[in-house]
């Protein structure tokens, strides 16, 4: 009798678990999406859907899948059901390209009195391919005031646009300490060349230039994260007529090529990069 009762109990328990495939999800499970913000799950034949209130916030989590690893992306808010539908909202809308998995735990959702077993939803946010082009560097007078880059192979170079674009910066390496030393504006100067212009002078020392991933669009593909080391032995501020003066404005455009000190004085008032050093020109004085 005990065995019969146990068997009957297990059978009833199995009936209480609804197959996780008995729902319709929008966007569809396994689909490509531009961003991961809201997901709607509908049980068409359901009458009453309950959500465990203690799991509404933080009970569901989204992960980015990287090979065999998964990296936490965001908590998911699961609101109370209306009719036969529930809405999952990403606490931090996800825009980065990659593969994502939303994990819904056991005992969170009950449909017409039947408990839903744990299940996952999978999505892909497509992204631009990462360029494998080579970027080479040179600087102006060894002072890092201007850094010139050449991309090869490349027939069309552009700078990414948008509020989230991060621009290059320079870090001074001093033993175990690393201090941010300068930020750079960027201008494209040719089909495969660009100039980085520093917002301040740097002292002698060892530096690493950081060019964040996706700053450049190289023939329709994004640039990878680039780290490049420089050694500044001395800051050159040569402005004598014999050696000539090279001047750039803060947009990276060359305005004087091998000119004289007088050419510098005749520039429109403003801030310029003179032989790699920042200089204020004020009404020719």
Image: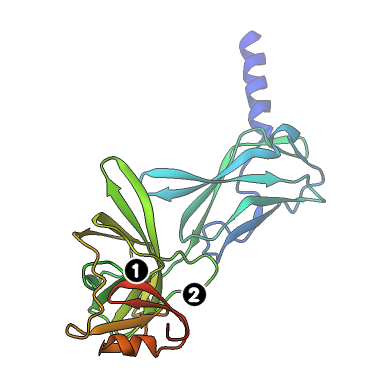
Q: Please state, as top left, top right, bottom left or bottom right, where the C terminus lies in the image.
A: bottom left
Q: Name the residue under label 1.
A: 223
Q: Mark 2 or mark 1, which is nearer to you?
A: 2
Horizontal placement of 162 versus 136: left or right?
right
Considering depth in this image, is 173 or 49 the residue closer to the camera? Answer: 173
Residue 255 in sight here: no
* Residue at horizontal 67 percent and vertical 14 percent from the top: 5
Question: Residue 72: x and y, percent?
Answer: 50, 43
Please tell me how crowded label 1 is: few (under 14), some (14-19), or many (20+) other residues with Cα within 10 Å: many
Q: Name the residue under label 2.
A: 161
Helix, strand or loop status at disc 1? loop
Q: In this view, does 132 lie above or below 229?
A: below
* Residue at horizontal 27 percent and vertical 83 percent from the top: 246
Helix, strand or loop status at disc 2? loop
Q: Quadrant of residue 19?
A: top right
* First of labels 2, 1 by sequence position: 2
Q: Please state, as top left, top right, bottom left or bottom right, where the N terminus lies in the image.
A: top right
Horizontal placement of 249 versus 208: left or right?
right
Please tell me how crowded label 2 is: few (under 14), some (14-19), or many (20+) other residues with Cα within 10 Å: few
Q: In this view, does 177 lie above or below 194?
A: above
Question: Residue 27: x and y, percent?
Answer: 61, 61
Considering depth in this image, is 216 or 198 the residue closer to the camera? Answer: 198
Question: Residue 148: x and y, percent?
Answer: 27, 75
Q: Is residue 32 above or below residue 81?
A: below
3D distance between C-alphas at marks 2 and 1: 13 Å
Horizontal placement of 167 versus 123: left or right?
left
> Disc 2 vs disc 1: Cβ atoms closer than 8 Å?
no
Q: Residue 98 carries which label?
A: none
Q: Quadrant of residue 200?
A: bottom left
Considering depth in this image, is 261 or 196 the residue closer to the camera? Answer: 261
């Amino acid at each position: 009798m005990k065995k019969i009762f146990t068997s009957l109990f297990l059978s009833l328990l199995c009936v209480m678990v609804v197959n996780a495939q008995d729902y319709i999800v929008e966007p569809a499970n396994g689909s490509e999406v531009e961003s991961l913000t809201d997901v709607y799950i509908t049980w068409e034949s359901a009458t009453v859907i309950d959500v465990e209130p203690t799991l509404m916030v933080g009970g569901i989590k989204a992960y980015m899948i990287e090979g065999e690893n998964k990296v936490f992306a965001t908590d998911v808010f699961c609101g109370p059901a209306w009719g036969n539908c529930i809405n999952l909202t990403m606490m931090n809308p996800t825009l980065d390209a990659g593969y994502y998995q939303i994990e819904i735990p056991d005992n969170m959702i009950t449909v017409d009195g039947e408990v839903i077993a744990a299940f996952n939803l999978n999505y892909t946010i497509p992204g631009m391919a990462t360029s494998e082009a080579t970027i080479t560097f040179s600087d102006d007078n060894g002072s890092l005031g201007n850094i010139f880059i050449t991309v090869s192979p490349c027939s069309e170079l552009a700078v990414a646009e948008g509020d989230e674009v991060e621009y290059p910066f320079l870090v001074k390496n001093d033993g175990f300490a690393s201090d941010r030393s300068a930020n750079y504006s960027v201008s494209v100067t040719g089909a495969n060349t660009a100039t980085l212009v520093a917002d301040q002078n740097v002292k002698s020392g060892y530096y690493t230039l950081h060019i964040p991933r996706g700053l450049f669009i190289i023939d329709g593909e994004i640039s990878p994260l680039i780290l490049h080391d420089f050694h500044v032995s001395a800051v050159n501020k040569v402005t004598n007529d014999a050696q000539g003066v090279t001047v750039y404005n803060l947009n990276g455009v060359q305005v004087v090529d091998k000119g004289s000190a007088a050419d510098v004085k005749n520039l429109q008032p403003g801030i310029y990069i003179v032989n790699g050093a920042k200089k204020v020109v004020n009404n020719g004085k």
